[in-house]
Image (tube, rainbow, N blue to C red):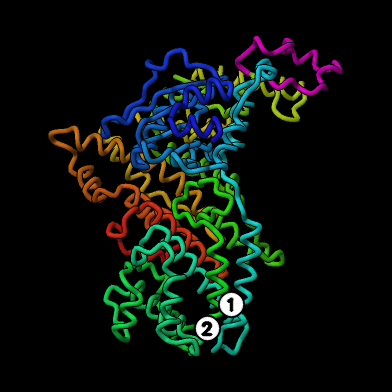
């Protein structure tokens, strides 16, 4: 057993980081404890630090929403952080990955004491620091090392090749169509449905069986016999799709079919309704084609939860969007996939900018002035406010000297940045801070022009709101925002918009919930909002966003179906138990 493995099993995280990885002690650990009032014992305590990057520890694993609240509080004390939640049975290492939009997504890695986990151990080894590099370490370099170690690893290329091959083979196996175009379209529809089922079977939503489809294929073959080559599609998938999953009042052809299908939820949403291709054609697909598909899919780890785990064989909805859109990306049609860093940034600036503009509250800019550096992006302010580390006086008149063309030292320069470029950025950043402090940035247009972190500003401002009137106005403002993507493709912009909106909705909802639970005479409208959530706020918020905020169109019908599939997956991702899964809403407007 390795030393790291032994310390992990004993939950001796301080020794691990201090003695094995070269981190530093926190000067005031007791003064920075973060607690959650809803869950007694869920305290985050800082255990080590390295150039402002802080490691926090919680001696329990609370539910996702509590973890998010704890992280938001920890962020106020350390912008760069890694959180470790641990109980006797499991550890959850959580890296808050900053989105370009200004929000965060939580990348998680799990560890179970007593079980080998070479992948996590390798990640931990990557964040060790030696004495020989102490003089050159900065917050940026430490953060980048932690980010590189704990960020999600994508497998898009391998899965894209596999799913492309399976789509082609499945299309060629389908019987009942006279046109290749119909075969290709129906193959994509079948794969979309199977992909959805692979995600929800992982959560045991299908007859409590995480290998539901593979086991049902064997059951059908045992039931129908070896000489029946179309039983899985005709006798199982068709009634599963159209009756069990697609109808609130299923009518099975016989008792045996009902027995094989088992206990599955009615999901609605239109994904499993009978479509014209199915109504107007007699379709058959051989079992061998599905055997190939299921064998390929079984090679991967399917995680419906959108938080990437870093597993090298992981498929999650975020990866899925890129993979599926590649199938419809044709250069002659001008179709290209938009990466999440672009969609996240654009959605953050536009949506939050619109929200703040409509709120039109002067206290927003008071919040900005109270801590200007918090809302200037990290890359922009690197080296700007640590003058002791900058070796040269910044005088623009001197920039003609050849020495300014040298590469900037890491304590003040970003990667590949020349000293002249670093100096210009730093002067601009210092000037921006002065403008904020003097109150010259007091509207959304000025904040957007200055490229401030509007998402963080909005979340911080909302966290301070206690007035029922302000909270209700914020909720109604969010509910009336409309996001339209006229070329939605696989829904990259729509999903990015959902993430930004969800953070805003969640911040407002927390304020509403505190008002309702803490007031003897709560505002009736706010009380109704909490009641509507029915104890499932995450699902309630995403459902509200999908129904009221997001709209997408595309000339390709298949693209719209992919976008709907991803939104459905985003909704189901918030549910942990099958009994809490509601019928999905009809997203015909997407």
- Residue 488 appears in the rendering: no
Q: What x and y, as percent, mark residue 273?
A: 40, 75
Q: What x and y, as percent, mark residue 426?
A: 66, 20
481 vs 469, left or right, is: right
> From the image, which quarter does the C terminus lie in?
bottom left
Label 2: few (<14), some or many (≥20) within 10 Å?
many
- Pick the residue in front: 328 or 477: 328
Residue 333 sits in quarter:
bottom right
> Looking at the magenta stretch, what is its main secondary structure?
loop
Q: Residue at x 38, y 67 (%)?
A: 269
Residue 239, relative to residue 419: is it above or below?
Answer: below
Q: Which residue carries the number 2 mark?
A: 285
Magenta span contains residue 188? no
First in sequence, mark 2 or 1: give its number: 1
Magenta-tinted stretch: 384-412
Tell me the number on the disc at residue 170.
Answer: 1
Q: What x and y, as percent, mark residue 68?
A: 39, 37
Q: Residue at x 64, y 70 (%)?
A: 165
Q: Residue at x 68, y 66 (%)?
A: 330
- CB within 8 Å, label 2 to label 1: yes
């Amino acid at each position: 057993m390795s030393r790291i493995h032994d310390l992990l099993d004993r939950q001796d995280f301080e020794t691990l980081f201090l003695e094995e990885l070269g981190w530093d002690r926190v000067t005031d650990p007791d003064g920075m404890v973060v607690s959650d009032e809803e869950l007694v014992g869920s305290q985050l305590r800082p255990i080590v630090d390295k150039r402002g990057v802080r490691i926090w520890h919680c001696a329990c694993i609370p539910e996702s929403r509590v973890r998010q609240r704890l992280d938001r509080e920890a962020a106020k004390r350390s912008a760069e952080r890694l959180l470790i939640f641990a109980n006797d049975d499991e550890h959850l290492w959580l890296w808050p990955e900053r989105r370009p939009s200004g929000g965060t997504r939580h990348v998680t890695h799990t560890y179970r004491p007593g079980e080998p986990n070479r992948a996590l151990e390798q990640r931990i080894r990557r964040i060790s620091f030696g004495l020989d590099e102490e003089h050159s370490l900065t917050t940026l370099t430490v953060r980048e090392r932690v980010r590189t170690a704990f960020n999600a690893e994508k497998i898009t290329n391998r899965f894209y090749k596999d799913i492309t091959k399976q789509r082609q083979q499945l299309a060629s196996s389908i019987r009942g169509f006279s046109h290749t175009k119909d075969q290709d379209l129906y193959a994509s529809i079948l794969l979309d449905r199977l992909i959805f089922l692979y995600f929800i079977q992982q959560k045991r939503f299908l007859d409590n069986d995480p290998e539901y489809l593979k086991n049902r294929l064997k059951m059908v073959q045992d039931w129908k016999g070896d000489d029946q080559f179309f039983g899985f599609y005709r006798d199982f998938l068709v009634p599963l799709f159209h009756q069990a999953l697609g109808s609130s009042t299923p009518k099975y052809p016989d008792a045996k079919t009902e027995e094989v299908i088992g206990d599955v939820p009615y999901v609605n949403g239109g994904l499993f309704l009978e479509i014209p291709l199915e109504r107007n054609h007699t379709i058959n697909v051989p079992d061998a084609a599905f055997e190939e598909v299921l064998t390929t899919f079984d090679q991967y780890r399917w995680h419906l939860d959108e938080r990437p785990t870093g597993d090298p064989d992981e498929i999650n909805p975020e990866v899925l969007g890129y993979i599926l859109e590649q199938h419809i990306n044709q250069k002659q049609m001008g179709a290209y996939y938009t990466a999440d860093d672009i969609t996240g940034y654009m959605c953050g600036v536009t949506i939050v900018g619109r929200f703040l503009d409509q709120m039109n509250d002067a206290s927003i800019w008071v919040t900005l002035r109270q801590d200007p550096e918090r809302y200037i992006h990290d890359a922009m302010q690197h080296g700007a406010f640590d003058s002791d580390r900058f070796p040269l006086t910044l005088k623009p008149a001197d920039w003609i000297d050849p020495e300014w063309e040298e590469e900037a030292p890491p304590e003040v320069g970003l990667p590949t940045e020349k000293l002249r470029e670093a100096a210009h950025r730093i002067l601009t950043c210092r000037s921006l801070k002065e403008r904020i402090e003097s109150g010259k940035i007091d509207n959304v247009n000025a904040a957007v022009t200055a490229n401030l972190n509007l998402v963080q500003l909005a979340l911080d401002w909302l966290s301070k709101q206690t007035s029922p009137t302000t909270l209700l106005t914020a909720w109604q403002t969010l509910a009336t925002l409309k996001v339209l993507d006229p070329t939605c493709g696989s829904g990259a912009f729509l999903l990015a918009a959902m993430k930004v909106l969800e953070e805003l909705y969640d911040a407002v909802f927390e304020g509403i919930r505190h008002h309702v639970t803490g007031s003897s005479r709560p505002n009736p409208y706010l009380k109704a909002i909490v009641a509507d959530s029915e104890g499932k706020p995450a699902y309630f918020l995403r459902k509200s966003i999908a129904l009221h905020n997001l709209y997408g169109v595309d000339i390709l019908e298949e693209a719209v179906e992919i976008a709907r599939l991803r939104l459905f997956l985003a909704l189901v991702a918030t549910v942990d138990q099958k009994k809490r899964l509601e019928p999905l809403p009809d997203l015909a407007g997407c």
